[in-house]
Amino acid sequence: MDRSFIENNLVAGVYTNNDKYFKKFTDNWKENYQNVELIYNVQAGKINENMERLRHKFIATGKRYWLFMDEDILFTRNDVIETCIKYMKKNDLDLITTYQTTDYELASKLDPSNLEFAYITWSAGYFMLVDSKKCGLVPFDLNLPTTHGNLSDLAYCLDIIEQADALIGIAP
């Protein structure tokens, strides 16, 4: 997939209430996706509130694909988003995620060719790529009965399945 497609059709964003990983994240982003629009949303509040704020910022861009990310995610290669969009289109998905590990050194040494696409029932919020034409109108639940708004990723996936009959997948 041509990088210009990503640059013209995708907006990425980070939802967080602190900037602890800001430099590490933005350095990694510039290394892998320098010309792709990034909204780094640092605001006080719960996770679900910040994800909903970010969704509204995404809407304002008019771009079709929205990538919600945690502030501590790092990319080990520069084709992760392209791979996800390829699988999203091929399988007519509403939301897609990718495999992850918390061990960056291990991830940079692994060969992802043994990983496979799979349909899943929910995605963790560290990397949620959404096709806004399919489920962009579904809001994040601001009434989750949790202290920090956690579980907003699970609740969102359940909501898009219920409200938009969404399909969710995980790409290698």
Image (cartoon, rainbow, N blue to C red):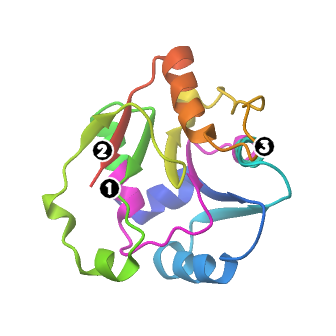
Residue nearest the observer in this picture, 120 or 117: 120
Residue of label 1: 83
Instruction: Please provide percent x and percent y for residue 10.
Output: 55, 52
User: Residue 16 appears in which quarter of the rendering?
Assistant: bottom right
Q: CA distance from mark 1 to mark 2?
A: 6 Å
The total of numbered circles placed on residues is 3
Q: Residue at x 26, y 55 (%)?
A: 172
Q: Amino acid at mark 3?
A: Glu
Q: Amino acid at mark 2?
A: Tyr
Highlighted range, magenta: 58-84
Mark 3 lies on a secondary structure that is helix
Disc 1: CA contacts within 10 A as few (<14), some (14-19) or many (>=20): some
The mark that comes first in sequence, 3 or 2, is 3
Residue nearest the observer in this picture, 118 or 59: 118
Mark 1 lies on a secondary structure that is helix
Q: CA distance from mark 3 to mark 1?
A: 29 Å
Specify the quadrant that holds the N terminus.
Answer: bottom left
Residue of label 3: 49
Q: Residue at x 62, y 31 (%)?
A: 136
